[in-house]
Amino acid sequence: MDRRSFIKVCGGTAALAGLQTTYLETVRAAETKSFARVKLVDAEGNALKAGKLASGEAYIFHYPYKSTPCFLISLGAKAPGQKMQADDGEYEWKGGVGPSGALVSYSAICAHQLSYPTKEHSPISYTGGTVSKLAGSAGKIVCCEHDRVYDPAQGGKMVVTTKEATQPLAAIVIEHDAATDEIYATGVAGGLLYDEFFRSYKRALMAEYGPGGAKEEVKDTAPTLLMSKYTGGTDRC
Ligand code: FES
């Protein structure tokens, strides 16, 4: 029995035993999971417009939970979709959206050991037009905590292989409304690491969001800020 089948059997058993949905989340880890359709808005609550996004820097918003940060990145060129491989199976990344197919979004929680951007500081960032020493090229997502490099133009897969392989960053499913130029988040595809994230940062999340607040799902709108406006400092590597 392969690992995926084994997890499915365990999930069924867990459900019979009355355990909660964390197992079910694991079962479907690599498949697209739908959440509320949420409009990305600016700090004043106005709809973000794809045509007005800066391209040299990532934006940060929180989705699907109030505490789980995501990158929104306007790449310089169309990003075609591709088949991806997460730890728990294959999934399809549909590629960039928007007028030129260059708008992409990923979980900003590192798939290695869950480093993430806080308001104070971030070890993980999008390098934009700057050539990162670690990546040896521009336009990558780098996590300076333990030197992982992910390519936002290739579904968020890890691209520098001097380190032990890490699964891709989970992809946030986004839609672009051509009539209004607005952007919506609708789901997550790939390896969902939210259970581990909530466990690992339990104390910090409790302090910031209060009891149960970190796991509340985002509804309706998600404020979306340039990374430099969201966080006090970003590691460079
Ligand atoms: S947590 Fe990002 S590289 Fe280890």
Image (cartoon, rainbow, N blue to C red):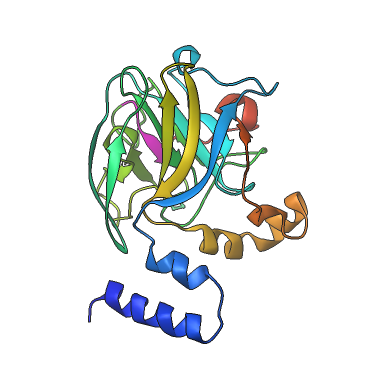
If the image is split into quadrants, where does the C terminus sit?
top left
* Residue 96 % position (x, y): 32, 30
Give x and y (percent) for residue 69: 56, 42
Quadrant housing residue 80: top left
- Residue that extends furthest to the top in the rendered view of this protein: 52
In the image, residue 192 sits, relative to residue 233, either above or below, namely: below
Position in image of residue 73 (x %, y %)? 43, 28
Q: Which residues are magenta?
A: 138-144
**Along the line of sight, the residue nearer the viewer: 103 or 206:** 103
Which residue shows up at 39% across the image and 36% down it? 141
Residue name at image x 57 percent, y 41 percent: 117
Query: Foreground: 140 or 194?
Result: 194
Q: Nearer the viewer, residue 148 or 106?
A: 106
Q: Percent x, y for residue 214? A: 67, 54
Q: Is residue 136 left or right of residue 182?
A: left
Q: Residue 236: in sight, yes or no?
A: no
